[in-house]
Image (cartoon, rainbow, N blue to C red):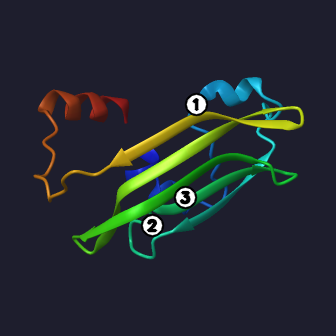
Amino acid sequence: MWLAFCSGSYLKQANHRLYPPSAFWKESVVHRGDWVDIVSTFQDDLGLPVRIDLQTTNSQRVFLYQVHEVTNTMNCTFPSEFSGVQYWLNGRTCELYLTIRGRLKTIHEGTEPQIPPEVWNAIRKQD
C-alpha cells in the first residue's frame, strides 16, 4: 500500500532505494541489492508511481509494479487498480515468487488529523 499511495515524496529523492515487497529477496542471488529501479510517476504534486521495474544489473527482472486504472480527485491521480510481481532469482533461473493486487474502493477528503496534547508534549520534550 505504501508503494501505491504514499511513496511519491520518497521517489522524488535523488538517492532513493527501493526493495521488493517480500524480504525473501535477501536469500536470492541479488541479496546485496544489486539492482536498478526504472520508475515512471504521475505528473502531479503527489508523483505516485505508474510503473516500477526493479532489475538486476544484467537486466533480469526482480519486481514489477504497474497501475492498471486510475482516478483523479483533489487535483491528484491515484491508482484505483494496481498489481505487482516479484521473482525469485536463483543462479540463471527466474521463478515467480509473489503476486500482489490492489483495488481502491473509495476515496474522499478526510478531516484534519487531531494530535492529542500528550503527544505534542512528548514531542516538545524531545526538542
Indicate the amino acid at tag 2: Gly
Q: Earlier in the sequence, mark 1 or mark 2?
A: 1
Drawn side of residue 110 relative to residue 12, left or right: left
- In the picture, which quadrant includes the N terminus? top left
Instruction: Check if mark 1's residue and mark 3's residue have beta carbons within 8 Å.
Output: no
Label 3 sits on a secondary structure element that is helix
Can the viewer see residue 6 in this picture? no
Task: For marks 1 and 2, give the one nearer the viewer.
Answer: 1
Q: Earlier in the sequence, mark 2 or mark 3?
A: 3
Q: Residues within 10 Å of mark 2 (few under 14, many from 20)?
A: many
Indicate the amino acid at tag 1: Ser
Query: Which x, y percent locates residue 58?
Result: 88, 52
Q: Which mark is residue 47?
A: 2
Q: Is residue 34 above or below residue 24?
A: below
At x 32% / y 49%, what residue is drawn?
A: 103
At x 37% / y 64%, what residue is drawn?
A: 69
Q: Earlier in the sequence, mark 1 or mark 3?
A: 3
At x 28% / y 52%, what residue is drawn?
A: 104
Q: Which residue is mark 3?
A: 11
Q: Which mark is residue 22?
A: 1
Q: Which mark is residue 40?
A: none
